Each structure stands twice: as structure tokens, then as C-alpha cells.
Image (spheres, rainbow, N blue to C red):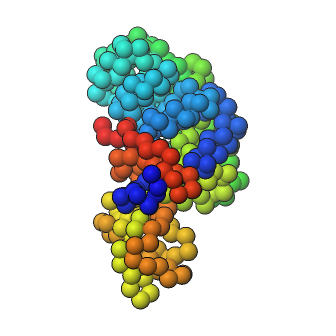
Amino acid sequence: MLITDLTTPALLVERDVLDANLATMSAALPGPRLRPHVKAHKTAALARRQAAHGHEGFTCATVRECEVMAAAGLGADLLLANEVLDTRRLGALVADGARVTVAVDSPETIAAAAAGGVREVLVDVNVGLPRCGCPPEKAGDLAAAARDAGLQVRGVMGYEGHLMLVPDPADRARMTGDAMAVLVRAAEEVGGEIISAGGTGTYLDNTWATEIQAGSYALMDTAYGRIGHPFGQALSVLGTVISVSPGHAVVDVGLKSLGMDHGLPTIEGAQVWFCSDEHTTFAPEEPVRVGDRLRVLPAHVDPTVALHERMHLVGGETVLETWAVDMRGW
Ligand code: PLP
Ligand code: MN
């Protein structure tokens, strides 16, 4: 099949760029130094490619992601880096032989883990992102409570997500060090082997974590493209030009096929004006014609992928493989 045969909008992944990104990352963070976050691509076939680069443990954001990973035979060491109250399906996964470690940051999440049949947890510590994570001074007490509840405490996690897109590398490194000092201190109180943190923005700066939870690096987006890391834009949304007017044109890739929370998408050789449900309006530098195909580059990978049922692995004009985005939904 050729790219021209695809119905648009269609999610494309440039194979050579993807493979280069995976190789670059696994050279920097080999084997267990990287625990790839699957939420960025939600695709078991892509996780399998990451496993082939030597990473056996994965990070998940949802119970559904854990289930699909386990069903794909990739459940040897899953970290659900998120708080979960409804642990019934996780207990079933553990009973079926998957290893699932769950983040906890409260007595309630500890009770839910223990009641649901989860055996292993990490204490999630707030390192400056106002999201999940306990106050650092509470981490030791929570670890004790988890052990009292019969849970194995493998260590801590603390996601410095507020620092990922800090543009100046020196600022980013310094702020990451400050955030990780908090996590390392909490780790001493908690015990265990694991300090899990980091992402694509801080994968080199964060030398304190025992494992880095990066996900976006595989496919990339234009927001991450701006910070100068050695990862290429593998992901795009293929569109068809459906209307041309003097001074602007319209492609059939809109809000419903693009994650927009990091801003407008990019079209090479064009100025993007705005997006609506099924349209992106842009001013091309060179004339375009109705029926032309072009690639729209999303500003944020994770919510873009989650809108699509499948992604097409492409090389040149050929569709090499089509993968189900099988970890979508909840
Ligand atoms: N860890 C957690 C808990 C996250 O929520 C995220 C992304 O938001 C990441 C790690 C890293 O992802 P990325 O590679 O996109 O920076
Ligand atoms: Mn993201």
C-alpha cells in the first residue's frame, strides 16, 4: 500500500526516524536505565520495538495500558505511574502473572492497592509539579503504612513534569537537580531500590533517578522539537488539501485529529493560522492545489495519538505496517 491510498486524516510514523530515536535513547539510557512511558504512543507494536532495544520494564498511565501490555507479553515489569482507586482489574492482572507496581500517595490509594490484590508499590512524591505525589515529608510514613498493609515498597517516584520544556538547558538542569534533591531525600526515608522520574525533557539532566520514564522521545512533537534534543519528528498527521483561496488553503486535519494543548500544529513551508474541528487553515509559501497531500506536525504527541485508532509505519511513499493504537480508552 502507498501513502496515497490512505484515508485522511491518517497518523504516520516515519520508520527510520522512529528507529533512530529508539537507538539514540537506548544508547544514552541502556536497558533498565529507561522505563519507556507507553502513554505517548499507546501502541503495543511500538512498545515491542522498544523492548527489542533492551527495555523490559515499562511505564503506564492507565489500567487499560497495563492490561494491553500484559496481553502483548510485555508485562514483566510494569509501573503504573499513577494513583488508582479502582484496583480490581489490576489485581486480576497480577493474579494472571503480570508484575504491576502502582504509585501511591495517600492512605486511600494504599488501601485500594492492598484491597485489590496489588502487591508492589512506589511512593509517589511531589517534586514541584502540582499534580499527584505526597508532600516529601510524608513519604516515610506512607511507606510504613504500605508495609503495614502487606505491600512491598520498591522505592519512590517523582515526576518533574513542570521542567520538561524549560527552554534554557542550564536552567533545566539546575531545576531538575533541585527537584531530585527532594526525591532523593524522600527515597532515604522510604527505602527500596527504585528512584523513578524524568521524561524526554530531562532524560540527560536527571542523573539522580535510577530509571527515566521518557515516552515522547520515540515519536516526538514540535513542542519537544524546540528544546534541541537529538530526536527527530517521526509523527505527523497526513492530510488532504480540500480548499484553496487567494492567500490561504485548508487541509482536512483539525482539532479532532490533533492534540492542541501545546499550541498550533506546524506545516513545513506554511504559516498555520488556526484549527477548527475538521480543518487547519494555513498560508502556504508556495502555491498548493486542491487534492495535494501534506503532513501536519502536532505540537503534543500523547493527546494526538489518543485520537487515532491506528498509526501507519511509513518509509518513502510506502506504508510498511499498520498498527492498532490498542491502548486507547479506559
Ligand atoms: N512520567 C510521568 C508520570 C508522566 O506523566 C510523563 C508525561 O507526561 C512522563 C513520565 C514523561 O513523558 P515525556 O517523555 O513526554 O516527557
Ligand atoms: Mn505529553
Residue 259 visible? The answer is no
**Is residue 86 left or right of 6 when viewed as pictured?**
left
In the displayed structure, does residue 186 sit left or right of residue 114? right
Q: Which residue lies furthest to the bottom in this view?
A: 246
50 left or right, relative to 170: left
**The residue positioned farthest toward the front in the image shown:** 1
Quadrant in which residue 277 is drawn: bottom left
Q: Where is residue 203 in the image (x, y as percent from the top left)?
A: 64, 42
Residue 267 image position (x, y, % from top left): 51, 69
Between 223 and 256, which is closer to the camera in this rendering? Answer: 256
Residue 132: % across, % down: 42, 38
Q: Is residue 51 left or right of residue 4?
A: right
Total numbered badges shown on the rendered structure: 0
From where the camera sits, is residue 266 visible?
Answer: yes
- Name the residue at 44% across, 72% down: 292
Which image quarter holds the C terminus?
A: top left
In the picture shown, does residue 72 fall above or below 61?
above
Task: Say which residue appears at 30% left-offset and 23% top-offset.
Answer: 89
- The image shows residue 47, relative to residue 6, as above or below, that is above
Choose top left, top right, bottom left or bottom right for residue 21: top right
Q: Residue at x 35, y 63 (%)?
A: 255
Residue drawn at point x = 39 percent, y = 81 percent: 244
| Front residue of this view, candidates 158 and 325 | 325
Q: Which of 182 and 85 is in front in this view?
A: 85
User: Where is 107 relative to 247, above or below?
Assistant: above
